[in-house]
Amino acid sequence: MPVYFYWGDDDYQINQATKKLIDKYIDPLWKDFNYTKINASGDLEVMDGLNQAATAPFGMGGRLTWLADTTIAQRCSEPLLAELERTFNHLPEDSYILFTTTNKPDGRAKSTKLIQKYAKVLEFTLIPPWKTDAIAQLVKQSAIEIDLKLANDAIDLLVDAIGNDTRRLTMELQKLKLSHYGEVKPMTAKDVAPLIQVSAHNSLQLAGAIRTADTSRALSLIGELLRNNEAGLRICATLVGQFRTWLWIKLMQESGERDDKAIAEAAEIGNPKRVYFLKQEVQGLNSQKLMRSLSILLRLEADLKHGKEETATLQTAIIELCQAMTK
């Protein structure tokens, strides 16, 4: 299939997938002639890219035209839609087009239906940081792909240390593979710990500090996260996800539900065994406290999206959240 459409917020994985396309289709000696990347946020830029893709490759290998940051799957004029279909139907042999965007395609749009008809569509979205079961599965699968054996406690350590950072996961696993070369036994947490930098500061730990109303630690953690260039909206999203999970656990408990599998399904928790630990975390809390906290977090999200000063806005919300836990 000569047309590719990659979307999602995992820039690293998209770039890695793009590199594979370049390696597959482009002759290195002819790359300057046959590979083009265009910031295709407007119709004119997309048209320019389509015109280039309609040109047969020079010399050896194929041609790849990368149209980055495109919005064609959200909004697309009728003239551009017609040009897309014409180009897709008349691409020269060995000419390929790649569209990339962070936004999910709008399934109602005509352009999306056209893309689904002609393109190979792949999703590259970051796993939410609070979905530790899914991150653990990613760590396990990534290790298998490079033939690295990891014990379960090593996987858990990597989840805590790296979170959903796919770029760092790739680098750390490659480092572990080199250090474990020739060994038969799986690496344990004891083997892994000295080789990776275990971050003492992440958004889930911030959620834990808020839950226990530890205002001083929570403010310290938010300061450290911001100094490490963690985006305020991403911190907020993690907190919303964690508090929503806690709220579901508490609501199910208060309704009299005792089946961990039923609770896990309602709270969208992949591993029912994790419910036991979540129950321990929400001991001493009630659903009213958690709902007040979610209300504060949703207001925080709105403030950040409207451009309020990040540090002060986050600090104020953290103090409010800790106070909500004590009322």
Image (spheres, rainbow, N blue to C red):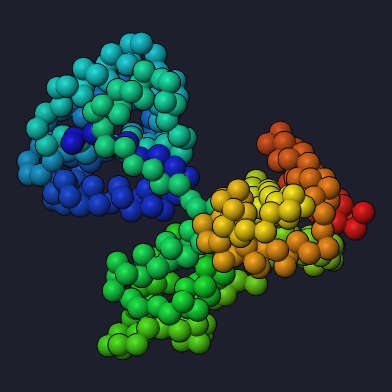
Q: Is residue 34 visible?
A: yes
Q: Residue furthest left?
A: 59
Of the 4 image quadrants, the one containing the N terminus is top left
Q: Residue furthest top?
A: 78
In the displayed structure, would residue 83 be above or below residue 314? above
Of the 4 image quadrants, the one containing the C terminus is bottom right
Residue at image location 61% in from the left, 50% down from the top: 267
In the displayed structure, would residue 115 be above or below residue 241? above
Residue at image location 10% in from the left, 44% down from the top: 61
Percent position (x, y) of residue 302? Answer: 72, 36
In the displayed structure, would residue 23 be above or below residue 143? above
**Along the viewing direction, whichever of 58 and 212 lies nearer the viewer:** 212
Q: Is residue 232 visible?
A: no
Residue at image location 40% in from the left, 39% down from the top: 7
Percent position (x, y) of residue 16? Answer: 33, 53
Residue at image location 59% in from the left, 53% down from the top: 262
**Along the viewing direction, whichever of 156 and 84 lies nearer the viewer:** 156
Q: Is residue 102 left or right of residue 67?
A: right
Percent position (x, y) of residue 45? Answer: 36, 25
The total number of labels drawn is: 0
Q: Residue furthest right?
A: 327
**Along the viewing direction, whichever of 239 and 37 lies nearer the viewer:** 239
Percent position (x, y) of residue 286? Answer: 82, 54
